[in-house]
Amino acid sequence: MTPEQRIDTFRSFVARSPDDAFSRYSLAMALRSAGRVEEAAAEFEELRRRRPEYVPAYLMAGQVLEALGRDADAARAYEEGAAAATRV
């Protein structure tokens, strides 16, 4: 399966079940792996908005934001992730 096919597959999963954390996380990770970092950041943000208890999203969001040079946003994601982990 090519990276684009993987992205398309995960997009179809998200379209069917937009609040499914694993599908959206997988889409974001596939986008990240394909070098589509801006899109990955948007998917991680949407995941954090829809499922704030899904702790793994915060670390990956932070890393993607760092890669984009958005250090303040990355720090915020890490802080929010620590708070989410404490709540969960």
Image (cartoon, rainbow, N blue to C red):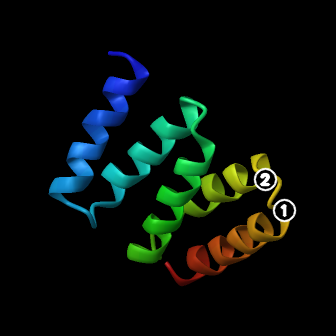
Pick whichever, 70 or 59, lies toward us: 70
- Decide: few, some or many residues near mark 1? Use Cα within 10 Å; few <14, some 14-19, many ≥20: some
Query: Which label belongs to residue 66?
Result: 2
Q: Secondary structure at mark 1?
A: helix
Which residue is rendered at x = 64% and y = 81% of the image? Answer: 83
* Residue 19 in the figure: left or right of residue 61: left
Which residue is rendered at x = 31% and y = 50% of the image? Answer: 23
- Is the Cβ of the residue at disc 2 closer than 8 Å to that at disc 1? yes
Residue situated furthest left in the rendering: 16
Q: Secondary structure at mark 2?
A: helix
Question: What's the residue type where badge 2 is placed?
Answer: Glu
Pick whichever, 79 or 44, lies toward us: 44
* Residue 12 in the figure: left or right of residue 81: left
Question: What's the residue type where badge 1 is placed?
Answer: Asp
Query: Which label belongs to residue 71?
Result: 1
Which residue is rendered at x = 76% and y = 50% of the image? Answer: 68
